[in-house]
């Protein structure tokens, strides 16, 4: 009986479930194809707060298509085929920042819309005792923990510096009264 050498076996792109409006799975495709075509799928985002209520944001890479170099949440990723939403949030947090936390708090779910790349976005939060900006407070490097007042100013006066996805998320949180009631 032949065995497959894992070192030489081809690796395939992770699959995500493409959904219809009723959240029924209609296909499974590579995550990159689903994102590029803006097909309806599930994603997660994790909002990281410190004990003072500051929210960590990160500038998107200049190479990211669709509004590069804009402030956005540091943890965002697809829910892989067959994966639970909570597990996807835990996996994305570990992959993006090296933080293992199993007790993420679900706070909001956004329905798909064009401004949100047609994603069912599941939003979680985590409060960390230390500063949560990846790499510390370094605005020039694109990492910073914003106070409530700084976030209000950013959203009111400098909207062009924020990703479209974060604007949609922040506005949804404000409408539901969650923005001021941070963990």
Image: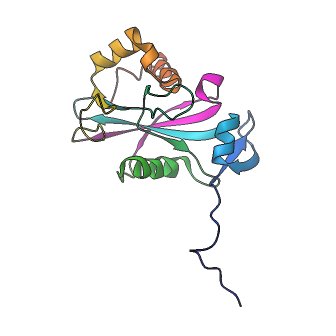
Magenta highlight on residue 116: yes
The outermost residue toward the right is 26
Numbered range of the magenta stretch: 104-128
How many numbered discs?
0
User: Which residue is at a point 57% across and 27% down the rendered structure image?
Assistant: 66
Where is residue 109 shown, x and y percent of the image? 54, 32
Q: Quadrant of the C terminus?
A: top left
The outermost residue toward the bottom is 1
Identify whether 91 is placed above or below 57: below
91 left or right, relative to 43 = left
Residue 69 in which image quadrant: top left
Q: Is residue 54 visible?
A: no
- The residue lying toward the viewer, choosing from 182 and 62, is 62
Where is residue 14 shown, x and y percent of the image? 62, 54
The outermost residue toward the top is 157
Q: Quadrant of the N terminus?
A: bottom right
- The residue lying toward the viewer, choosing from 147 and 95, is 95
Magenta region's main secondary structure? Answer: strand
Where is residue 79 shown, x and y percent of the image? 58, 47
- The residue lying toward the viewer, choosing from 19 and 166, is 166
129 left or right, relative to 96 = left
Colouring convention used in this rendered image of the protein: rainbow
Q: Is residue 180 visible?
A: yes
Residue 46 in which image quadrant: top left
Residue 78 in which image quadrant: top right
User: Which residue is at a point 40% across and 44% down the rendered structure image?
Assistant: 104
- The residue lying toward the viewer, choosing from 105 and 166, is 166
Identify whether 8 is placed above or below 48: below
User: Which residue is at a point 40% across and 37% down the rendered structure image?
Assistant: 74
């Amino acid at each position: 009986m032949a065995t497959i050498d894992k070192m030489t076996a081809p690796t395939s792109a992770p699959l995500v479930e493409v959904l219809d409006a009723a959240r029924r799975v209609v296909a499974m495709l590579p995550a990159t194809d689903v994102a590029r075509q803006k097909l309806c799928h599930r994603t997660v985002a994790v909002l990281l707060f410190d004990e003072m209520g500051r929210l960590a944001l990160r500038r998107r890479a200049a190479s990211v298509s669709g509004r590069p170099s804009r402030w956005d949440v540091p943890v965002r990723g697809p829910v892989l085929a067959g994966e639970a939403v909570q597990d996807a949030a835990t996996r994305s947090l570990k992959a993006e920042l090296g933080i293992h936390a199993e007790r993420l708090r679900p706070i909001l779910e956004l329905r798909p819309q064009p401004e949100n790349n047609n994603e069912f976005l599941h939003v979680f939060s985590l409060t960390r005792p230390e500063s949560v900006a990846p790499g510390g407070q370094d605005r020039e490097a694109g990492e910073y923990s914003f106070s409530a007042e700084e976030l209000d100013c950013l959203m009111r006066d400098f909207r062009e510096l924020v990703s479209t996805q974060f604007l949609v998320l922040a506005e949804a949180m404000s409408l539901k009264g969650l923005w001021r009631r941070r963990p």
